[in-house]
Image: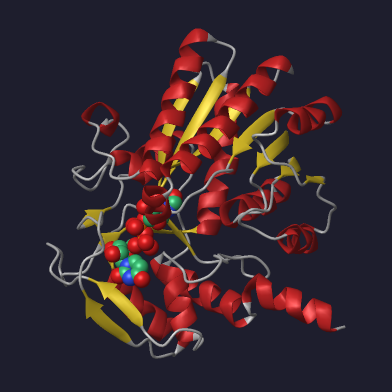
Amino acid sequence: MRVLVAGGAGYIGSHTIVELYKSGHRVVCVDNLYNSKHKVIKNVEEIVKAKIPFYKIDCCDKKKLESVFKKEKIDAVIMFQGYKAVGESVKIPIKYYRNNIDSALTIIELMDKYDVHNIMFSSSATVYGKSAKSPIKETYDALELNEITNPYGETKAMIEKILMDKTIADSKFKAVILRYFNPVGAHESGLIGEDPNGIPNNLMPYIAKVATGKLPYLNVFGNDYKTKDGTGVRDYIHVVDLARGHVAALKCYNKKQNLYVYNLGTGKGTSVLDLVNAYEKANDKKINYKIVGRRAGDIDKLYCNPTKANNELKWKAKLDIVNMCKTSYKFETKGGLGCQEKKQKKK
Ligand code: WQD
């Protein structure tokens, strides 16, 4: 298939492009580079040994995005584009609603106009809200309970609803909704990985900065949760397994149903301290940390029941926590994309 990957220069988008190529699919990448770098596309090209058609376009810009639909023959669209920082979304909600909802609606309208009927949406476990009991199944409907704790999560839930309503109205339109748990790790080459701007919000990239001496220590947000060691428990999934889940999900477009929803996770809960210990062992590095107060909005446990995706997509997360930690560290020691760019400029 020829897949338009919206937000393809991002962490998950770039890893998915690699796996799409490895499975014989071809890609057209669109990204406004708001939260990523063009260097990512160059590095993906180095990994797949092929040129990636890339358009630096904001998916809210209908006129510019239409030029891609006009020029390229598209069989399916994967929507990764969107702002995704939970904390930031609480501070600037209107930007999040405008950007995330507008870009999704723009893409869907252009798909209609150019007869593209297959869409895959990068959703998030955040849509399960704060009361879901882990292991969580896809049937848990937080939408009705309105338990989502932040505008970022609300945008994910709203786009899911938009897609569900569209599939009811249009039997030709096929939507696959993938709810990610906590993506971590990097491609084995160390050429692509999680490269957030500034101080990382998420645990794994923060640990990576501590491991490489770029930050002095990790703040562990609370050790009084109802978990085995008191620290937050999450379902960390290797980003390459996550990317492979997207490739596996393409088979849904050959099936008769036109709406599919899957959790993409390992089904295993890992605490903050578990991850710190695993990182230290995998990379023989000391991770200094301090226990501090809880972070607003955090919950005790969040991990999935992945059996629906395992059975229906014939997909299962295979890469273990050691690989997650080793590849994260390798990417960080290669200096992440920023430093590679700096090296580039020195020549
Ligand atoms: C994990 C655990 C923290 C940082 C969010 C989004 C989710 C997805 C992944 C986009 C928690 C603890 C963290 C730190 C810490 N993003 N922690 N110190 O909050 O589970 O999920 O990112 O799709 O939608 O909600 O991920 O990595 O921020 O936190 O102790 O410096 O690590 O309290 O228990 P989270 P996270």
Quadrant assignment for the N terminus? top right
Q: Is residue 292 visible in this depiction of the protein?
A: yes
Quadrant assignment for the C terminus? bottom right
**Depicted 12 relative to depicted 202: above or below:** above
Q: Is residue 266 visible in this depiction of the protein?
A: no
Q: Which corner quadrant of the figure contains ligand 1? A: bottom left
Residue 166 point in image, percent of width and height: 50, 16
How many labels, in total?
0
- Classify residue 278 as left or right of residue 254: left
**Depicted 297 relative to depicted 131: above or below:** below
- Classify residue 250 as left or right of residue 177: right
Residue at screen point 42% across, 31% down: 261
Residue at screen point 63% across, 27% down: 106
- Colour mapping: secondary structure
Residue 7 point in image, percent of width and height: 63, 46
- Classify residue 229 as left or right of residue 187: left
**Depicted 332 relative to depicted 179: above or below:** below
Query: Which quadrant of the figure has residue 35?
Result: bottom right
Residue at screen point 61% across, 54% down: 10
In the image, 317 versus 288, the foreground residue is: 288
- Classify residue 346 as left or right of residue 138: right
Residue 116 point in image, percent of width and height: 69, 21
Residue at screen point 46% across, 23% down: 162
In the image, 248 versus 144, the foreground residue is: 144
